[in-house]
Amino acid sequence: MLSVKPAGLRHGGCDYRSVVSVTRWTATRTRQFSSRQRLQPGRKIENHFCGMLAALGAVMIAVSEITTFEELANLRITWRELWEKTPNASFVQSWDWFRSYWRTYGDKQELRVLLVTLRTKPIGIVPLVTRHVETSLGTASVLSWPKNTFVPFYGAIGPHPAATLSTAFSHVRKTPRNWKALELPQIDEFGRDNLRTNNALRNARLKPLRIGAVAHPVVEMTDCWDDYMGSRNMSGRMDFIQSEKVIEHCGPISFHRWRPAGGIVGATDRRWDLFRVLEGIRRDVKGRGRRDDCELAVMKDAHSAAVDAGVVEFCSLTVSGRPAACAYNYRTGSRLENVFLGARQEYGDAALNCLLGHMVRDSFMRDDQRIVFHPYDAQRVGTWSNADFTSIAYGHYAKFSPVAQLLKRRRAAEAEDFPVQRPPVKVEVAAEEQAAVSANAPSLKVHAGV
């Protein structure tokens, strides 16, 4: 473990001249930042002073760098405590998910986890890994988050993300550089991240470039089910009705939802039978929506921990008792993050459309607030989406490295595959049209698990 000791301490005391200079620097930096960025009213004040926190780190904040998994395992309790204090934390930010991730990808990547402490007390963790990306000019070493295509957001772990990120990236800049590019995808820039990552990179003089913006289809459930269906366009609602009729010709359909409460109440049944259903349906999924073998291995390895934490759920649609489609989600409070969505090839899009209709309706009944889907599923989710969520990717590339500049161009080209989409326009439907649809709509057969 490599520890960076706090500077500015002389003979056990504090160098007050350095504190004064830090204060002056902070005031100047804050004025420059405020004039350059037109921050909206109500923006959290920690964003204004993340530069100040980085400077005060010279006095009281230290960074420890962990480069082996054995050392990191000794911090699992600290990681779990910080994860529980992280605002809107996702399961993929937990120690259990990272452990499953490293078991799958550890032999191909190098570990670089930064532990930020304030007066020897841990306040945050920034998990980073070094990946090796092949280009036509050679191999580029890329410092990044753990590879995560499961949820749309990733970031620092702990209750003070602004101070953690600012201190960590200042440490990255000051230490010997063994990477050619820094890439940080899945940033909720104006939401949960609240410009913290952008500000931290700028304060560390690692100028961030936007190398992509990915639109995730979202189902917002702020109204009731009837109002939501009334806001869908006519073709989308008729498509759902026709899909149910097509599937019912193959046999009786039923919807099941398994949402364990977690080990704290004794709900520790892993339901591996449901996971085997997912593996069977996955073999029929084609294209980008199909999880690769490594991603499936991470999901399977982390499944037990997700059940114990009570953050997983499984939705399935059966036809004559045979699984036709399924969805595997992580949940944080009333927010759901879809990890896998698929249907058997013999039933096609009709089964998937039925599954989505039942799942959204049941979520309204359970008072869920939001379901976020993967960008690859934008076409399959179709008219069920009534909003979108855009995650930003930041990059910083070595200016005089041909490999890094080539990688920068490649990322810009890849970003064009995912244009940012706008939320669909809410369609007002005439009363007689709604009555016609309601008359033809079959009743939903729901068998929801606990």
Image (cartoon, rainbow, N blue to C red):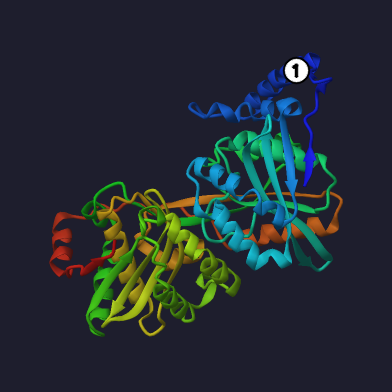
Q: Quadrant of residue 346?
A: bottom left
Question: Is residue 317 in view?
Answer: yes
Residue that numbered label 1 is attached to: 19
Q: Is residue 13 above or below residue 274?
A: above
Q: Position of residue 41 (x, y in %)?
A: 49, 26
Q: Is residue 117 left or right of residue 38?
A: right
Q: Quadrant of residue 16?
A: top right
Q: Position of residue 263 (x, y in %)?
A: 41, 56
Identify the amino acid type marked 1. Answer: Val
Q: Is residue 158 left or right of residue 74?
A: left
Q: Is residue 420 above or below residue 119?
A: below
Question: Is residue 191 in view?
Answer: no
Q: Residue at position x 43%, y 56% from top? A: 311
Q: Is residue 267 left or right of residue 44?
A: left
298 or 71: nearer the eye?
A: 71
Q: Residue at position x 52%, y 41% from top? A: 86
Question: Disc count in the image?
Answer: 1
Q: Is residue 37 above or below residue 396?
A: above
Q: Position of residue 345 (x, y in %)?
A: 41, 83
Local crowd size for mark 1, using a 10 Å CA cut-off: few (<14), some (14–19), many (≥20) = some
Q: Position of residue 251 (x, y in %)?
A: 23, 84
79 or 200: nearer the eye?
A: 79
Q: Residue at position x 80%, y 17% from top? A: 15
Label 1 SS: helix
Q: Is residue 203 above or below residue 14?
A: below
Q: Residue at position x 29%, y 61% from top? A: 450
